Each structure stands twice: as C-alpha cells, then as structure tokens.
Image (cartoon, grey):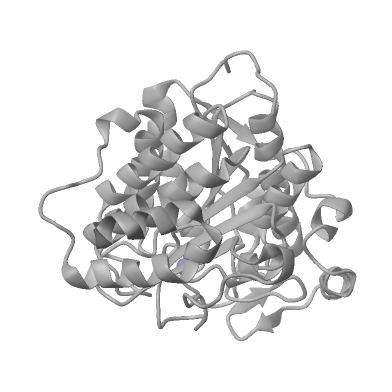
Amino acid sequence: MSEAPAPKFPLTIWSDPRFQSHQSSGYHPERPARLDAALRGARAVVAEAHGEERTVRAPATREALSRVHGAAYLDSLDAADAKGARVQLDPDTYFGPGSLAAATLAAGGAVAMVEALLAGETELGMLLARPPGHHAMRDRAMGFCVFNNVAVGAAHARSLGARRVAIVDWDVHHGNGTQDIFWRDPDVLFISLHQAPLYPDSGWVGEHGEGDGEGTTINLPFPAAGDGALYAAAFERVVLPVLDEAKPDLILVSAGYDGHARDPLASMLLRDDDYAWMAARLREAARRWCHGRIGFCLEGGYDLGALELGVAATLRGALDPAAHPTPTEGAPPPAAERIVDGVVRAASPWWRCLREGAAVSAA
Ligand SMILES: [Zn+2]
C-alpha cells in the first residue's frame, strides 16, 4: 500500500447511538449496556490521547455485505425486518425492530474504519458496535451475531487493493464465522485464540483451511483457566512470527473481552493488562508491515467493568507499545508450552517461521 501523510489524530474510534436499537425483549447478555461500558473505556483514552471519535455515517451497502454473505441470507433478513416481528435467528440470536438497521450500520462501521486506515487518515482505529460479528457465517446468523463485521471490513480492504489482510481474534469464543467465510481464501490470514471446548465447539488445531486457503487459518484452542502466560507463549511462538512471515497490508482484530477473568460466560483468566500487551505487540507488527495500520472491532465481553477497562487497556497498549512489554516473569507453564507445541506442529507445513522455530527449540 502507498505511503500517506501522517494522520491528524493518533487514534480514531467509531460508534453510533443507533446500535442500541438492537434490543432483546427480556434479559440477554448481549445488551446495550455493554456498548455503553466499552465506550466509556474508549472515550477515556480518546480524551487523554487527543484522539477522535466519529459516528458511522453509512450502513454497509449490499455490495459490501455480499462479499461475505450469501444473497438468500441477506434477503431473509430483509424479509424478517419488513415484517417487524421479533424472531430468533438461531437459539442465541434475537432479531427485532431496529436489529437490521443496527447490524447493517455495524458492518458499515467496519467499512468506514478500513477506508480511513487504508487512506492514511488514521493508523489506529476501533469500532465500537453492536451486534458483534465473528460467529456470523456466510449463510446464517449465529451466536449473537448477524453480519460478520470484521469479515466485511477485511473483504472491503481487499477490494480497495490490500494484498493480504490479517485478522487476529482474541475473543474467548472461536471465530467460526470468520473462519467459514475465509476458509478457502489465501489472502485473508485468520488466527483465532480461544477457549475450547466451549461454544461454538470448533476451532481445533486440525482446522487450517482448504484449497488455496490451506494454512491461512490458524487455531489456538486453549483449555479453561488459560492466563496471560499462555497467551504470551502463543504470541511469541505463533501469532507474531506468522504475522511477520505473512506481511499483511492491514491488521484487523476481533477484540472480545470475554477471556477476562471476570467474564461470566467463559473461564479464562486474562487481566486488563493482558489486553494492553497483546494490542501493543500487534501494533508493533502493524508498524513493521503496514504503516502501523490496525483496526479493532468489538466482539464479545459480558462483564461491564472488564469491557470498559479491557477496551481502554487495548487502546493504551496500541498507542504506546513500548510502555506495555509482554510479561516475562516466570517461564510459561509446561502445559502452555505443550499446547503451543501442538499448534506449531499443525501449522508448520505452511509457515517457514514455525519450522525454524521448532528446529531451534528441539536443538
Ligand atoms: Zn465471545
């Protein structure tokens, strides 16, 4: 991608009050208060870093949605919206008046963020939107997600000339929708770190893409109670070397905060600071390969305090990577090493860096 003048703001966030028109009839963990909490965290960092907040001006076009979703699925949502009734798109995913408008705007936010990043208007973006996206498959809604926002963004980046886009998904659930959409696509690298077994019961190391996309899906399934040391081992030995070999033109992050120790839906042990160093390392990779350009898309996260602080930590880490080193106290536990060893072995046929790393650690 071409060089661009330095951006005016160190950080740009996107959100919109219309996301809150997506509401369930009774209590549901994917609720408007989540976005309020995430926005509090993001706005605190925008204020301290003199960043910029934008509203999402335009919903995603049919063309942008069609790059990652099938026509029959899009038509079925239009029909459900026209009826105006409340329906369940799947057992977990509610849809009512205002849901289609919010979901289309959420995907439009990913489009807007990607356009701003590739135009050099900003280097560091975050989309704070509902509903989330990473479980949405090509042909159906799933797991609170209607449109796959990060996938719409990645496909839009490709349409604008990005040669290769990397998506790193640290939501505690496997990003099965994103994997589905780019399963055969060699130009979108998808790396997911998640608790397994856990919903949606996919994302095992043997799932690595097919056809031309073989090897460009990498799954890191972690057992419950994984902590920062496990994620640090995964970043050092898999995520960062693969990003350096892939040399993406843009890095997008499916940023969920349900891996936080306080989250009620999962059992991982990440702390606020872990989101800061993970974001810091990804921003450094973006500086090495794509002019610093990185965009975070809010996915899950169901403890309001963890969401607020996790979002703020992410942005602080991405803004000032040097101030957020990867924690090195103590060696990673042997169990963590074994898990990462398994991922390295599974992905090494397609990644020279993993073969070299394996040789070094065996020596
Ligand atoms: Zn999740």
- Image quadrant of residue 92? bottom right
Quadrant placement of the C terminus:
bottom left
- Residue 152 picture location, percent across and down: 72, 53
Between 15 and 238, which is closer to the camera in this rendering?
A: 238
Identity of the residue drawn at 31% across and 61% down: 260
Q: Where is residue 335 shown, x and y percent of the image?
A: 21, 73
Residue 182 in sight: no
- Counting from the top left corner in percent of width and height, residue 314 is at 38, 43
Does 133 sit left or right of 38 as displayed?
right
Q: Position of residue 315 (x, y in %)?
A: 41, 37
Q: Residue furthest bottom?
A: 91
26 is higher (above) or lower (below) than 56: below
Q: Is residue 355 left or right of residue 297?
A: left
Q: Is residue 10 left or right of residue 279?
A: right
How many discs appear? 0
Residue 120 vs 66, above or below: the answer is above
Residue pictured at 34% horizontal, 60% vertical? 358
Q: Tell me if residue 171 can be seen.
A: yes
Locate the N terminus by quadrant.
Answer: top right
Q: Residue at x 52, y 29 (%)?
A: 292
Q: Residue at x 26, y 47 (%)?
A: 273
* Residue that sits furthest to the front in the current view: 363
Report the front residue among 363 and 51: 363
